[in-house]
Amino acid sequence: MQRQTLTDVRTCGINRDRWYVVARSSEVKERPVSVTLWKQPIVLYRSESGTICALEDRCPHRQVKLSAGIVKRDRIECAYHGWQFDAEGNCAEIPYRAENQKIPNCQIKSYPVKELDGFIWLFPGEGDSEKIAPMGMPEWEHLNYIASVAAIDYQGHFSFLIENIMDMYHGHLHDNYQAWASAKLQSIEVADDRIDAHYEAQSYYRIDKIWSISQLFFPALRRLHPEPLDVSYIYPHWASSLGQDFKIYCLFCPVNETHTRAYLIHFTSLNAFWRLHKLPVKFRRFVKDSLFGSANKLLEGLVEQDIEMMEQEQQAYSKSPQNRSYEINPTVTSVQRLIRHQASLGSF
């Protein structure tokens, strides 16, 4: 029974009736951008007014990629023959069409898409996208939080990544890159669409003085102290908090069974500096923007080490899927059950 469960998990699709993150807002500018969300090639483009649009990345005329084309006002124009498509996927113009020729009924799929908290969220399913809200990150715009972002791109199933970041027992892998040590699982809460695991850990950081942020860069300044470490799989994304000072998100874009993209977003809290809260908003915005990315090196180091392990896991599974893996952390087994359940609801 255990062997079949693992085999299912490593080949599970996604529940498409959820919001996924396909790009950062800053990555979509004047030119169209091609992305893939669980085997679906999608083109993102920004209209002249700045609105994000998402269509299947295919011109129905000759089946070439629309992402190789250009944007004209609120339409995307195919690079091959200049056919233009609007944000709903309708063919709106063919430059060489004769007056007596009708535009073919060759609509392509359009996707609900939103810009929220610095990222582009896309709903690939057929369900009602208005009934399900994107997870969002309230700290993105909050003046008391400093953000850093690292991209994750590895050759492996998305289950390896969510298991990795829900399992706080692999900390010795990360040496000086991690913010905590000696995690101990206290409790787990499981629902149909989320898992909340509560650990007790020893934190290396305490952001309570003006020089505290320097601990991110100088390990000698760190001192261990107990903090709660909470991690949540809010399908299909992940959120965690370490005490009052740190919040981390992982936003998923599964590409296929053996390729996953994601974004890891780290927030450092400035809530302890009460004098800062009394300063003008414009100055606080300047401080927030100036410190953006201050933990990037830390995040990139974590990501590099995790990717190496996750790709080894995928390679081992691909080579010998019949080999049984043994797991004693109930958080991980709960994650596997949730992935299988959600895949059964809206997989493709």
Image: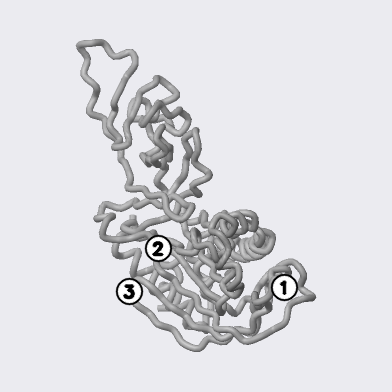
Q: Which residue is mark 2?
A: 135
**Which mark's residue is nearer the viewer, 1 or 2?**
2
The reply to whether callout 3 and callout 2 are in contact (CB within 8 Å) is no
- In the picture, measured across the screen, residue 185 lies left or right of residue 71, that is right
Q: Which residue is mark 1?
A: 175
From the viewer's side, name the closer residue of 98 and 71.
71
Q: Residue furthest right?
A: 220
Q: Regarding mark 3 in the picture, which secondary structure is present there?
A: loop
10 Å crowding of disc 2: few (<14), some (14-19), many (20+): some
Q: Residue at x 34, y 51 (%)?
A: 124
Decide which of tag 1 and tag 2 comes sooner along the chain: 2
**Residue 9 can be seen, yes or no:** yes
Q: Residue furthest bottom?
A: 186
- In the picture, measured across the screen, residue 23 lies left or right of residue 14, that is right
Amino acid carrying label 2: it is Met
From the viewer's side, name the closer residue of 291 and 320.
291
Measure the alpha-carbon separation of dots 1 and 3.
35 Å
Q: Is residue 105 above or below residue 313?
A: above
Q: Is residue 136 above or below residue 66?
A: below
Q: Residue at x 43, y 22 (%)?
A: 80
The reply to whether callout 1 and callout 3 are in contact (CB within 8 Å) is no
Snapshot colouring? one colour
Decide which of tag 3 and tag 2 comes sooner along the chain: 2
Decide which of tag 1 and tag 3 comes sooner along the chain: 1
Rendering quarter of residue 334: bottom left
Q: Which label number is shown at residue 192?
A: 3
Q: Position of residue 293 (x, y in %)?
A: 63, 57
Amino acid carrying label 1: it is Asp
Q: Regarding mark 1 in the picture, which secondary structure is present there?
A: helix
10 Å crowding of disc 3: few (<14), some (14-19), many (20+): few
